[in-house]
Image (cartoon, rainbow, N blue to C red):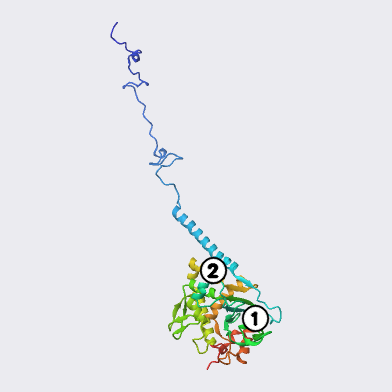
């Protein structure tokens, strides 16, 4: 057999690659490739239609995700805060005790403006025995208790007026004769006290509000204290008061003692009602501070402290209570008046001429004409 391999069509049998395509000989003519016009060529660096380069950002502005999420979180926080601001007073309203303080008959007709009766009782409700000892309040007196503070707050078209009625004021109590005004509460509770005040002043009481010892202490402490400005050094064992002369920050215990103290003064109850109004004014100034609303702990503590020992007439509405707070703040500020009922002497007898004049102006809602009838101690200006 010959070793010579056949050429031609049998070359594949011997491992030789057969071309897949016939390559024209070098001497065969080539066709020229037609040149495309520039307008027919795709723009440089652009992808085919319907596709885009992977690392190229999409066309049009895109909103930053972080800013969008920030606005959403801020919106949720604002909504939660509004719910909190509404929920706390709503909850506190449910904690307030309601009482029937409206006499059944013999009341003055309705009058212009609104008159609130504010009573500070010696109730120990909400205080433990240890707290009563610490605050020097003594034990519970039993029965209905007594009223250390009696004030009328009138608000209407003129300046708001806060008028103290000293608890030792001698008045006629229906069914009990002439005696100290605070005995009316002991004899017949809120109803008889309202009836006594209406009979002796002719002023129609629209709303009844009562605060116990515990409420005052807790509200003051929740506000971080209030300012008092005693004019002399005071140390009184009966009230537990021990303060230096001059303006200072007082905690709840000190503010309560300052409001109760009378044995340190020559004018006794006449000076005490002035101290009570001073503490109320400081509470109002602190409570209306923006920090009360912005600080959730303080906001909740104030609402809890006030509602825990507050009693109101069963016909007092949440709106009426809110207006009371505004009027109280106005009367203790530069827009209102605060004074003691016109007195004839230090024995706490009401002035038979000046007191009726002031009562009439309040009944007619003409408080802008009270003028010199309103004095701090109730005595005529000298």
User: Is residue 128 depicted above or below 62 in this figure?
Assistant: below
For discs 1 and 2, the disc positioned in front in the rendered view: 1
Q: Which mark is residue 187?
A: 1
Q: Nearer the viewer, residue 241 or 21?
A: 241
Image side of residue 110 versus residue 56, left or right: right
Q: Which mark is residue 328?
A: none
Q: Quadrant of the N terminus?
A: top left
- Whole-percent x, y for residue 26 in the image: 31, 22
Q: Is residue 90 visible?
A: yes
Q: Residue at x 45, y 84 (%)?
A: 234
**N-term-proximal mark, 1 vs 2:** 1
Q: Residue at x 47, y 54 (%)?
A: 69
Q: Residue at x 35, y 15 (%)?
A: 12
- Whole-percent x, y for residue 67 in the image: 45, 56
Separation of marks 1 and 2 at Cα, in angstroms:
30 Å
- Whole-percent x, y for residue 163 in the image: 57, 83
Judged from this view, the residue extending furthest toward the left is 3
Callout 2 crowding tier (Cα within 10 Å): few <14, some 14–19, many ≥20: many
Q: Secondary structure at mark 1?
A: helix
Judged from this view, the residue extending furthest toward the right is 105
The number of callouts visible is 2
Image side of residue 62 versus residue 138, left or right: left
Picture quadrant of residue 38 = top left
Q: Secondary structure at mark 2?
A: helix
Callout 1 crowding tier (Cα within 10 Å): few <14, some 14–19, many ≥20: some
> What residue would you read off at disc 2?
304
User: Is residue 142 depicted above or below 165 in this figure?
Assistant: above
Picture quadrant of residue 172 = bottom right
- Whole-percent x, y for residue 105 in the image: 71, 80
């Amino acid at each position: 057999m010959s070793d010579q391999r056949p050429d031609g069509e049998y070359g594949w049998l011997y491992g030789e690659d057969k071309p897949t395509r016939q390559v024209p000989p070098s001497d065969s003519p080539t066709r020229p490739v037609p040149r495309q016009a520039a307008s027919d060529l795709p723009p440089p660096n652009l992808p085919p239609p319907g596709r885009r380069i992977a690392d190229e950002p999409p066309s049009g502005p895109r909103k930053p995700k972080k800013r969008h999420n920030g606005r959403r979180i801020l919106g949720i926080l604002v909504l939660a805060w509004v719910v909190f601001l509404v929920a706390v007073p709503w909850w506190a309203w449910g904690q307030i005790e309601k009482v029937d303080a409206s006499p059944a008959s013999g009341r003055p007709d309705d009058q212009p403006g609104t008159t609130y009766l504010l009573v500070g009782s010696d109730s120990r409700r909400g205080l433990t025995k240890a707290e009563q000892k610490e605050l020097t309040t003594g034990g519970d007196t039993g029965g209905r208790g007594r009223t250390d503070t009696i004030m009328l707050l009138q608000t209407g078209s003129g300046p708001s007026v806060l008028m103290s009625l000293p608890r030792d004021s001698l008045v006629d109590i229906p069914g009990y004769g002439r005696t100290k005004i605070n005995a009316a509460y002991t004899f017949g509770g809120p109803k008889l006290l309202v009836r006594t005040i209406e009979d002796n002043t002719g002023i129609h009481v629209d709303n009844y509000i009562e605060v116990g010892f515990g409420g005052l202490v807790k509200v003051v402490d929740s506000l971080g204290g209030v300012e008092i400005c005693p004019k002399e050094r005071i140390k009184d064992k009966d009230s537990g008061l021990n303060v230096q002369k001059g303006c200072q920050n007082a905690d709840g215990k000190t503010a309560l003692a300052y409001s109760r103290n009378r044995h340190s003064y020559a004018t006794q109850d006449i000076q005490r009602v002035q101290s009570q109004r001073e503490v109320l004014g400081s509470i109002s100034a602190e409570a209306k501070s923006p920090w009360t609303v912005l600080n959730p702990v303080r906001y909740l503590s104030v609402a809890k402290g006030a509602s825990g020992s507050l009693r109101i007439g069963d016909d007092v509405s949440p709106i009426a209570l809110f207006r009371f707070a505004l009027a109280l703040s106005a009367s203790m500020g530069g827009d209102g008046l605060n004074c003691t009922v016109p007195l004839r002497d230090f024995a706490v007898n009401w002035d038979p001429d000046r007191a009726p004049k002031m009562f009439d102006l309040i009944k007619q809602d003409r408080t802008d004409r009270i003028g010199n009838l309103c004095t701090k101690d109730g005595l005529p200006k000298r």
